[in-house]
Structures are given as structure tokens and as C-alpha cells.
Amino acid sequence: MTQEELDQKAFELLEKAVNKAQASLIREHTFSPFMFTIGSDGLLRTIENRAIDAKESYALLEDSLTQRVREGNIDILVIAVDATMPERYRTDMDHCIQLHLEERSQLDKKISARFIYVPYQLYRSKESEEVHIRLGQPVPAGFPAQYLK
């Protein structure tokens, strides 16, 4: 795959993660951590677990990811977590969908991974009890890769 194709795949993965988190937030007002990966075979995989506690769920995802990275078959990964918006990026929304993106094709760069914070606010309209979500402007923050090394 070309770099442009890989970038497009990463963008699609981020979009898919936001959509999945958004649907769960509307339905359940929260979501458990989950991970999407695209392997060297080009296949999309969704990794979730049944842990109820978010910290335990995240730890299980990290364990799974560590094993998959050792096997060497991940080109792109996105981990999604329901989080509090970091103070330095906070505006009028306290909560965010935190996306952790790493791409094997970016490992030669100093800033090879990114957190993308997508602020959100849940609300109900005056007309109904239906829950809606308002997403804010995504905020990226770069750092060296943690998993794909």
C-alpha cells in the first residue's frame, strides 16, 4: 500500500471508532474501551472484552495488543476510551472520546503516534427524552509510538 492509502485507512479507522463510540454513548451514556487494528493482511479486526470495569478492560486490551504486536501483524491500531478531556484542551465539554492512533508506516518519525481527543456532550431535547450527542472539534496531540516499535 502507498502512504496515501495507509493514511486513508487510518482516517477511516478513526471515523469508524468515533461512530462506534458515539452510538454506544447515545444508547448507554458511556462505552467500554475497544480497539480496531488493520493487519499486514489488510483485514480490519475489532478487539473488545467483557470486563465491566473500564480500567480492567483497558488493561486487557493492552495485553492483547502487546501479544499481537509481538506477532508482528499490526500495521494500524486505534484504541478508543471514554475519558475526561485533558485540562489543557478543555473548552465547554468535560468528556471526550480519546483515540490512540499508531501506524507502522510512521515509526521513522519522531512524533509517530497521536492521541485525538473528540470532546462530546450528551443532552436531551425539550421535545423528547431521546439522548443526543454533540461532538466538538477534535484535538490532536503527538508523541512517540508506545506499542508499534
Image: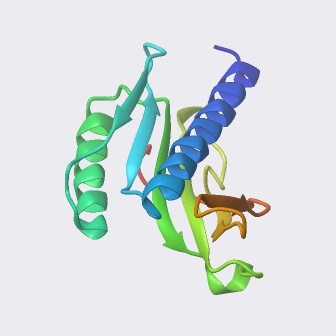
User: Observer-nearest residue: 123 or 138?
Assistant: 123
Q: Position of residue 25 (x, y in %)?
A: 51, 57
> Residue shown at 44%/43% (left/top)?
148
In the picture provided, is 20 more to the left or to the right than 138?
Answer: left
Does 129 appear above or below 85? above
Measured as percent of width and height from the top left, residue 98 is found at 55, 61
Position of 82 compared to 46: left or right? right
Residue 147 at what x, y percent from top left?
41, 49
Count of numbered circles on the image: 0
Residue under the image location 44 percent in, 17 percent down: 43
In depth, the one of 94 and 9 nearer the eye is 94
Residue 39 to residue 141: above or below? above
Which x, y percent locates residue 94? 63, 80
Residue 90 at least partly seen = yes
Q: Quadrant of residue 125?
A: bottom right
Look at the picture and state if 96 lies above or below 70. Answer: below
Q: Identify the residue at image location x=43%, y=13%.
A: 41
**Residue 106 makes an appearance in the image:** no
At 66% from the left and 60% from the top, the residue drawn is: 133
